[in-house]
């Protein structure tokens, strides 16, 4: 039986590949999802992939994960720096969490240097582009 891993994506990631490609690259979120599903299959992991521009919807998905998922990969995007609600929801999840950022948030504007989610995550992958998502799956396969 494969482990179910939730992959959550925050606001504006639906525009991945179109919005600021000089920062986030040209790969779309659909490309990332396909790559994650292929890697998940190879590792014996089932992937449930989500994206929302709405904080409350992400909180609801995290609550759903409590009953279904073995782990969460989350790119909270801008909510990294603002959302205590997402942090609180992640604190109700008993499994491991890996935070992913496509860009290196520590090389960007000062307000991006702090992430509420990081205090809950077992690990943070930042600045490696969309490869960070795939590397997070390697962690869950261990």
Image: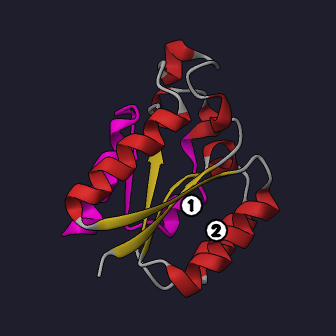
* CA separation in Å, label 2 and label 1: 5 Å
Out of 138 and 104, give the one closest to the viewer. Answer: 138
According to the image, label 1 marks what residue? 117
| Mark 1 Cα-neighbour bin, 10 Å: few <14, some 14–19, many ≥20 | many
Q: Position of residue 79 (x, y in %)?
A: 69, 50
Residue at (62, 18) in percent of width and height: 18
Residue at (38, 68) in percent of width and height: 122
Q: Position of residue 75 (x, y in %)?
A: 54, 49
Question: Range of the magenta residues?
Answer: 113-142
| Mark 2 Cα-neighbour bin, 10 Å: few <14, some 14–19, many ≥20 | many
19 relative to 3, above or below: above
Q: Position of residue 104 (x, y in %)?
A: 44, 33
Residue at (36, 41) in percent of width and height: 35
According to the image, label 2 marks what residue? 87
Cβ atoms under marks 2 and 1 closer than 8 Å: yes
Out of 28 and 21, give the one closest to the viewer. Answer: 28
In magenta stretch: residue 123: yes
123 relative to 11, above or below: below
70 relative to 108, above or below: below
């Amino acid at each position: 039986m494969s482990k179910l891993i939730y992959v959550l994506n925050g606001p504006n990631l639906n525009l991945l590949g179109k919005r600021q490609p000089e920062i986030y690259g040209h790969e779309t979120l659909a490309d990332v999802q396909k790559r994650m599903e292929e890697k998940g299959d190879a590792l014996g992991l089932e992937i449930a992939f989500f994206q929302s521009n709405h904080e409350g919807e992400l909180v609801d998905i995290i609550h759903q994960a409590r009953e279904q998922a073995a782990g969460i990969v989350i790119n909270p995007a801008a909510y990294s720096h603002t959302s205590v609600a997402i942090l609180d929801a992640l604190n109700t999840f008993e499994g491991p969490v890996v935070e992913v950022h496509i860009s290196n948030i520590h090389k960007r504007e000062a307000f991006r240097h702090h992430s509420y989610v990081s205090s809950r995550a077992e690990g943070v992958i930042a600045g490696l582009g969309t490869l960070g998502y795939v590397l997070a799956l390697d962690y869950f396969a261990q």
